[in-house]
């Protein structure tokens, strides 16, 4: 065996040993046959770009092919044709479904064609898979952040920033997306249970359009001159809400808690525009997605759900390299 192949086999052996996959030689040969498709919510979002990096790291270590194919916007209407085009080829599909309901039937087609389906970031149905109940339990695993918890963390951070009282609202994408629905649910639940002096105004839905989120911030402020804060429930919602606060000349007066951590978050935290960013760990989601698909294809059982963590970023820790490494890649 030449040196490079020995190194590759050794690397594969250590990854496989780490994930409990036993003898490597047969699997290394099998792995060459595997092509794993990763279909993101949209291709141009730093969250999914970072997820792809983690997925590619696992694919390289395991010697499988990773195909990253998605739509330019977060929309079931554009995502389903991508899925239909991909179905012919892969050994397994990792997908962030852009709608809890509308992706059930298109994904069932893949499942019926014998392709293992794992959902990453978002889920279909209730997200409870392999239960034998309901019409959307067929995916093998759901790998994601705990989004209800993330929403609660956002509520606590925003309540602290505004001194525990006043008007706030949620800037959100659109109903029907599992992640952002759950963040709003967690946010409202924590505010209701823990902060009785905080009033949560009506949610503003921006269709994942940061410009729309910025205009909405200004419109809500025009109707509520005592607006104290906003929770941006995903990258574009938070970016737009922050821009809206800046355009309204209210930086530091209207406090912003952001879900997600694009590179611009560092400046926005340092300048005081954003108080807290809750960074997800998308690279871990991608990594465990590929490892799980590979494990399943190699005949192993896999966990029905894998939770990944958060890193809470604020002015006190944004310069710490152990924290900054969770800022997403462009
Ligand atoms: O917040 C992430 C992701 O978790 C969500 O499902 C959709 O929006 C993002 O991709 C950020 O834009």
Image (cartoon, grey):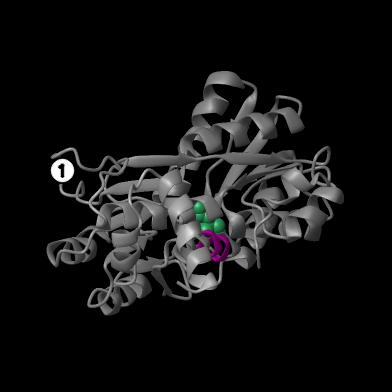
| Camera-nearest residue between 105 and 176 | 105
Instruction: Report x, y in % for residue 115.
Output: 21, 64
In the displayed structure, would residue 93 be above or below residue 143? Answer: below
Dominant SS of magenta comes to: helix
Quarter of the figure with residue 191: top right
The one nearer the camera, 114 or 6, is: 6
| Quadrant assignment for the N terminus | bottom left
Magenta span includes 52: yes
**Residue appearing at x 55%, y 55% in the figure:** 283
Magenta stretch encompasses residue 142: no
Which structural element holds mark 1?
loop
Question: What residue lies at 23% left-to-right and 59% top-to-bottom?
Answer: 116
Q: Is residue 95 above or below residue 176?
A: below
Magenta segment, which residues?
A: 48-54
Q: Residue 205 versus residue 86: which sits nearer the camera? A: 86
**Percent x, y of residue 323:** 73, 44
Q: Which residue is mark 1?
A: 134
């Amino acid at each position: 065996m030449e040196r490079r192949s020995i190194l590759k086999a050794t690397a594969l052996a250590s990854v496989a040993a780490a994930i409990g996959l036993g003898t490597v030689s047969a699997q290394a040969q099998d792995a060459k046959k595997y092509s794993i498709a990763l279909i993101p919510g949209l291709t141009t979002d730093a969250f999914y770009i970072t997820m792809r990096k983690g997925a590619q790291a696992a694919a390289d270590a395991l010697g499988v092919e990773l195909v990253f194919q998605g739509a330019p916007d977060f929309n079931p209407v554009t995502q389903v044709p991508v899925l239909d085009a991909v179905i012919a080829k892969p050994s397994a599909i990792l997908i962030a479904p852009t709608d809890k309901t509308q992706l059930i039937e298109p994904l069932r087609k893949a499942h019926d064609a014998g392709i293992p389906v794992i959902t990453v970031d978002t889920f279909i149905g209730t997200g409870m898979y392999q239960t034998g109940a309901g019409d959307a339990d067929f995916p093998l695993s759901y790998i994601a952040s705990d989004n209800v918890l993330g929403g609660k963390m956002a509520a606590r951070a925003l309540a602290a920033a505004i001194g525990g009282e006043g008007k706030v609202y949620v800037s959100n994408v659109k109903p029907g997306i599992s992640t952002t629905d759950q963040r709003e649910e967690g946010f409202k639940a924590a505010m209701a249970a823990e902060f009785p002096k905080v009033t949560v105004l009506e949610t503003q839905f921006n269709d994942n359009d940061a410009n729309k989120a910025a205009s909405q911030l200004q419109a809500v402020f025009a109707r509520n001159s005592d607006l104290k804060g906003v929770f941006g429930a995903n990258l574009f919602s938070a970016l737009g809400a922050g821009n809206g606060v800046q355009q309204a000349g209210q930086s530091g007066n209207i406090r912003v808690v952001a879900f997600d951590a694009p590179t611009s978050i560092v400046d926005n935290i340092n300048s005081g525009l954003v108080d807290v960013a809750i960074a997800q760990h998308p690279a871990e989601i991608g990594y465990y997605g590929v490892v799980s698909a590979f494990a399943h294809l190699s005949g192993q059982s896999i966990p029905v759900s894998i939770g990944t963590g958060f890193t809470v970023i604020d002015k006190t820790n944004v310069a710490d390299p152990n924290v900054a490494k969770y800022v997403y890649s462009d």
